Image: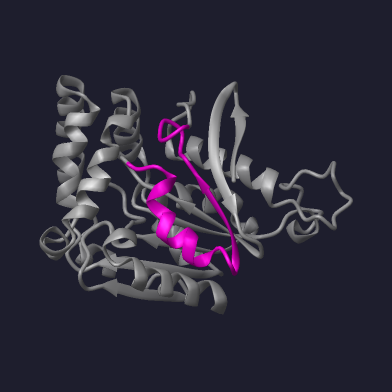
Amino acid sequence: MMKEILIAGKKIVYRITGTGKPVFLIHGFGEDGEVWNNQVEYLKERFQLIVPDLPGSGRSEMIGDMSMEGMAEVIKSIYDVECRNPHSQKVKQSPSDSKVPPSEVFREAVFIGHSMGGYITLALVESYWNHVSAFGLFHSSAFADNEEKIATRRKGIEFIQQKGASAFLKTATPNLFSTISKDEKPGLIDKQVATSDNFLPAALVSYYEAMIRRPDRTDILRKATVSVLFIMGKYDVAIPLEDGLKQCHLPEKSYIHILNESGHMGMLEEAGKSNLILEKFLLEI
C-alpha cells in the first residue's frame, strides 16, 4: 500500500505492507524505496515493512532541511503515524516524554539503512534510541567522510551541476556493482540505471552536501545496547570491506555478514542471501 504524509507542506511517500514487528527499510543515494522490492516480497509474511521514498527521491518532494538529521526526522514522522501502540490510550503523550515508557505509546521498530540510508538511520538512533529495537547498516558506515571522499563528492557535485542528475547516475551506478554482477547479471544494472531519470540535480547535490557535513557517529555504535546488523560487500568500492570491518566490532551485539559476490548493491546482487540474512536477524533479536 502506498501512503503519504505532509512535512511542512511537502509530500513524503512510503510503502507499507505485512503485519508483525515494524521494520523500516531506508534506501540510499540515487535510489528510491523500490530498491527493496525483493526484500519486501520475501519478508512481508512475517513483518510489517515500512519503506519510504526519502525526500527528493521517487515520489517524495524535497524538504527544507535535507541534512541527515532532517531526513531522520521525516522517518520519525512516519514512525509516529505507523507505530503507535493500538492498545495505548495515552494519545496526548509525546513519545519523547521520559515519564512514559515508549512501549506504552509506540511500538519499537527496526531500522535498516542502505548506504546513505544508514547515515540517516544513525542520525535517527542518536535522537530516538529508545524507540529502536535494533538497527542495521547495509553497505554503510558510521565514519565521517575523509578528505579523499569529500573531494570525490565535490567532483560529483560539479558533474551533476554541469551535466545533470541522469548523466551522473548513468555514469556512477554501474560502478556500484561487482564485476561478477556485471558479467552474470547485467539486467540488474540496466534496471537500476533506468531509474536515473527520476532525480532532480538539486536533490542529488543536497544529498552529497549532507553526506559531506555529517559527523562521525561511531559513538552510536559503541553505546548501542540493541543488536546491530552489518552487511558488507566483498567488492564494495563505495564502502570498502576494510572500512566496514573497522566498525563492526564496536557494538556490544553485532551480527556481521559479508556478501562475497556483491559490490555496493547486495540487496539486488545477492537478493536471496540478503533476504535470509535479514530474516534471521529480525527473528533472533
**Closest to the observer: 65 or 257?**
257
Q: How is the image coloured?
A: one colour
Q: Residue at x 44, y 63 (%)?
A: 221
- Give the x, y percent position of residue 190: 20, 47
Q: Is residue 172 left or right of residue 10?
A: left
**Magenta-colored span:** 31-59
- Give the x, y percent position of residue 30: 31, 40
- Residue 277 seen anywhere in this rendered image of the structure: yes
Count of numbered labels shown in the rendering: 0
**Closest to the observer: 82 or 198?**
198
Q: Is residue 102 left or right of residue 158?
A: right
Instruction: Note whether 63 is above or below 261 in the view shown.
Output: above
Q: Is residue 85 left or right of residue 31?
A: right
Q: Is residue 174 left or right of residue 125?
A: left
Instruction: Note whether 70 is above or below 90 in the view shown.
Output: above
Asked whether 57 falls inside the magenta stretch, the response is yes
Asked whether 190 falls inside the magenta stretch, the response is no
Q: Residue at x 29, y 28 (%)?
A: 205
- Residue 147 seen anywhere in this rendered image of the structure: no
Q: Residue at x 39, y 58 (%)?
A: 218
- Give the x, y percent position of residue 285: 57, 75
Instruction: Spot the residue most to the right.
Output: 89
- Give the x, y percent position of residue 28: 36, 46
Q: Residue at x 49, y 23 (%)?
A: 64
Q: Quadrant of residue 159?
A: top left
